[in-house]
Amino acid sequence: MKASKVLPLIMLSIIMFSLIIPAVTPALVKAQDQEIVLRTHGWWQPPPIRRYNPLAPKAIVISGIIYERLAIWNKMSNTYEPWLAESWEVDRDNNKVIVHLRQDVYWHDGERFTAQDVWTTLMLYKLLGRPVWKYISDVVVVDDYTVEYRVKEWSYLLLHYILFRDGLIVAPHHIFGDFAERVASATTQSELDQIKEDLFNFEPDTIVGTGPFKFVSVTEQELITEKFDQHWAANNIHIDKVVFPYITSNEVGWLHYQAGDLDYDCFMMPPQVEEQIKALPHADVIRVYDLAGFALVFNFDNQYLQDVRVRQAIAYVIDRSKVAYAAGGTAFEPVNYPTGILKLVEDTWLSDIEQYLDKYETNTDKAKQLLEDAGYTYSGGKWYTPDGQLFTLTFIVPAGYTDWVAAAKEVAEELNSFGITVELKTPETGSYWSDQWYLGGNYDLAFDFFGAWMTYPYNAFERIFIQVNNRPKTQVQGQNFPLIYDLGAPFNEEINATQLVEVLSTSFDEAEQKEAAQKLAMAVNHYLPIYPIAEKKLMLYYNVEHFNWPDPETNYELWQNAAGGHLEALAIMIMKGLVTPNPSYWGITTSPTTSPTTSPSPGVSTTTVTETETVTVTAPDMATTAIVGIILLIIGLAIGFFVKRK
């Protein structure tokens, strides 16, 4: 071919190539090299206040963002999706559950994730007495990506423990393996006690997880994580950093909302603040069921509160509707029946026993009669105990929970007006949720969550009767906290609450589950170990100026997963490629292409899911495209010149 004919072809090819480059290699160029940062609040302080050891007290454990579970739990539908696990098989005949792991997972320090890491985590969970070990006898590594759980007692909630609750994998074998090996070979309790002491004293240099973001640093002002490029869903993730400014107060959170320097969060707001925030051009708010509410908690080491008549009198004084409205207007609803069962599922669990339940509608005459029957006297507008002491109670709520503080003020005002002297204290939020205050039983009255973020009533009753934040109720509510209750009609029998909570965990029989739940509900309703007051809708704020978010209507369950775990819900949305930078703010373009996802089918033991992939197209700016084109054009002219000379 002659040079005169070759030259136009070369020139045309180079020009076409210069125009195509932005389309075929878009992800390699980020507009203006901007760093995409998403901000949501945190509550962690640097060591020694908090710990890098995820198995030690006061650890920094950010599930979803830094650490991952074996499966995603969709709370409303009560279904599971693969996460670190690709699939699982329930083999009842051979008493085992087999979990197949993803093969493209790495720890943040670059080590490959394998079944040994699951085994290590589970052995340390055994040391700590985590609930899954009530139902399994062993965990066996079959191969690098297969783990076998040996079942000693089948439980209705076994998959929940394996895949979700105790499926949070936090202990890489290359860091914690020695501790796990010691647990596996220990033969005495004294050995185990020494291993636990050594484990709690161990401090890694940093935090190492498998999640979409890896730990960078923590100061008194903020915790910083950055995108983990080796994450199995890295192609879906359009955010370079997630930063957690230290915020422990709703009021401070609102200021950040107004300034637009938070991108996602869940600070509760009174109606007027919510309307102000929603009116801002950068903000939107969605309400989801929190699957929880707040309850008044009694300390049974207070001799006066041990008397059920006193607890009932307090319940009859309180106007739940007023308290709910004070907490947050229409975001809170008073419970129908104080039982611990969420209103959302009352028809399922309580329809047969409603006639035997007390609503505790406000009735100060009845409250007065109950106190008088208990030997209390009323004089000068105050109630006095049977031994002649002014009846005085200390009531605590965390200072940063403005909704709880407002509700507590209403409760205190109503009780004080009735003549029960109540002193309200508001310790700092972090210390409230510690042995210093609530978890150590240092109060007379307190607020706690009830419902516990699960529609099935096991979590609710476990928190009421068994433990709170891994502390036994005899620590949180006093050594005299009761577990035996004498029920009237329709059951007319004495029950053991611990045994019935275990029935909810283990039984596959729906009738047996329902009977256990009803008996526990009756015990709560009559004896009031706690007094459930109101349920709430969780307010999720999200910044629409900075990011595009999944449509709350078509992706409601994704948002609903924030109940009891708003950061985990955020991580799931990010990993699915559904949180993307807003082009008008960041100056880039995203174009998601998503493959269909097959969710687990009810009743099918083995679950396989097609991974969701999102291709992000980040177009270079026009100046970059022009420069590249000019350079290629010059190269083309030079080649053409030499070809022509030849």
Image (tube, rainbow, N blue to C red):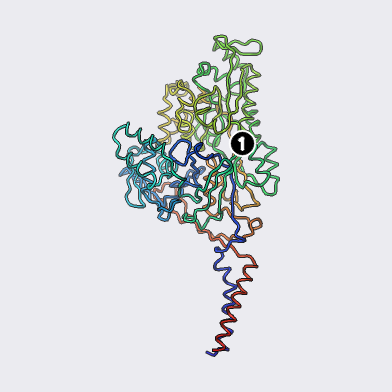
| Vertical position of residue 558 compared to residue 268: above or below | below
Q: Label 1 neighbourhood size at 10 Å, few (<14), some (14-19), many (20+)?
A: some
User: What is the three-letter code of the residue carrying label 1?
Assistant: Ser
Q: Report x, y in % for residue 202.
A: 41, 39
**Compared to 49, does 207 lie above or below?**
below
Left or right: where does residue 476 sit relative to residue 196?
right
Residue 576's x, y, as percent? 52, 53
Please name whichever residue, 200 or 342, is drawn nearer the observer in this view of the structure: 200
**Total marks placed:** 1
Rendered view: 577 above or below 10: above
Q: Is 70 displayed left or right of 354 in the figure?
A: left
Q: Is residue 526 visible?
A: no
Where residue 420 sits: x, y (%)? 61, 17
What residue is pinned by disc 1?
249
Of 615 and 488, nearer the camera is: 615
484 vs 103: above or below: above
The percent coordinates of residue 3 (x first, y second) are 55, 88
